[in-house]
Amino acid sequence: MQKAIKLLDNLTINKIAAGEVVEGPQSVVKELIENAIDAGATNIVVEIKEGGQKFIRVTDNGAGIYEEDVAAAFMRHATSKIQYLEDLNAVLTLGFRGEALASIAAVSQIQMVTKPRDQLHGISIDMVAGNITNKKQVGCPDGTTIIIKNLFFNTPARLKFMKTPQSDTTKIGEIMSRLALSQPHIAFKYINNNNIMFTTSGANHLDQTILSILDKELFKSLIPIKAEKQDMALEGYISQPTYVRGNRNYEIVFVNGRYIKSKFLYRSIEEAYKEKLPINKFPVCILNLKIHPSFIDINVHPTKTEIKFHKEEVVYDLIYHSISSSLVKSTLVPKLLLQN
Ligand code: ADP
Ligand code: MG
């Protein structure tokens, strides 16, 4: 016999949603940093322990959250970033779905301390599996510090499929690098098990940020890219064909500051390098595409790393032609002259 249909309770809904938004500790790190970026932070410190499985702390000096909004920040579909779906045509924030904090809170233990600049005191809040266990006023610096402990402690099925701390550390390292590269005007510090992995200056020089995070050889081989076409602007650096990597992980394209994974973007890059690279070797590109938000649809997947372009061919041409012409130029003109 069929059972009666019942509405799921909030915690169950959030735990189910966490399955989509929170793939592992790396997604927690990504969501928390994106919130710090959206809050206008100029300084972000990320500390993880044991691959983030036991401990993740993100500290920012951004806008902070007002006392009356603190509980709402952890509610599902609660966001300060959009009000209607149409707002997405103008939105430039990384978040807008209002589900990250609710999903993370449902499957972890959280401590948050937050203070907007114009407030005399901040708020400290503790949560266990989405329930507030403590909330009080505290003295604290401007901005937000959020600590996530014991991810998936109340979802045994997820816990069983946790990867090793090493493999999660690798994923977090990649996400940290991309986020820091996407925001050269923000000073990042990334600490893993008490070791400082990298710091960036926040001085808004992408080449210096690349040097802080990646290697010196790459820095020496960088070729600048700058191009515009039909309300789109492309800027960044690519590597000389003599500098190669064994995978695509550093074919990085940010669209309006958001890291996007897309086969067609990889194709536009790799076609431009065609015949200049050995087989199964890949270039490094760190490119920033600025495009009017109404020309893209980012609401394709909860993790927002997929995108739909309304004018895919124009984007392809812009990337392909600017890379191929810069590669030709760089072999004709010594690199030092190009930079002046
Ligand atoms: P979204 O980012 O999609 O709005 P989240 O669940 O990630 O959803 O965050 C909910 C809300 O909490 C945000 O809209 C924002 O108002 C607030 N918030 C979260 N993190 C921060 C932060 N580090 N600084 C200031 N506000 C924050
Ligand atoms: Mg968010």
Image (cartoon, grey):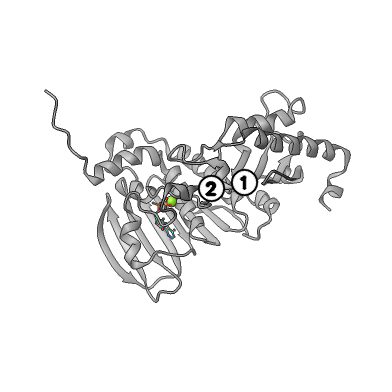
Number of numbered discs: 2
Ligand 1 sits in which quadrant?
A: bottom left
Q: Nearer the viewer, residue 208 or 22?
A: 22
Q: What x and y, as percent, mark residue 241?
A: 76, 34
Which numbered disc covers residue 291?
1
Q: Identify the secondary structure beneath mark 2.
A: helix
Q: Quadrant of residue 163?
A: top left
Residues at discs 1 and 2 in contact (Cβ within 8 Å): no
Q: Amino acid at mark 2?
A: Met
Q: Is residue 120 left or right of residue 192?
A: left
Foreground mark, 1 or 2, reads 1
Q: Is mark 2 within 8 Å of ligand 1?
A: no
Q: Nearer the viewer, residue 27 or 74?
A: 74
Q: Amino acid at mark 1?
A: Ile
Q: Quadrant of residue 69?
A: bottom left
The residue at 32%/42% (across/down) is: 152
Q: Identify the secondary structure beneath mark 1.
A: loop
Counting residues from the start of the chain, the first of labels 1 and 2 encountered is 2
Question: In the orientation shown, which residue stands out farthest toward the front?
Answer: 86
User: For mark 1, does the 10 Å Cα neighbourhood hold few (<14), some (14 to 19), or many (20 or more) residues?
Assistant: some
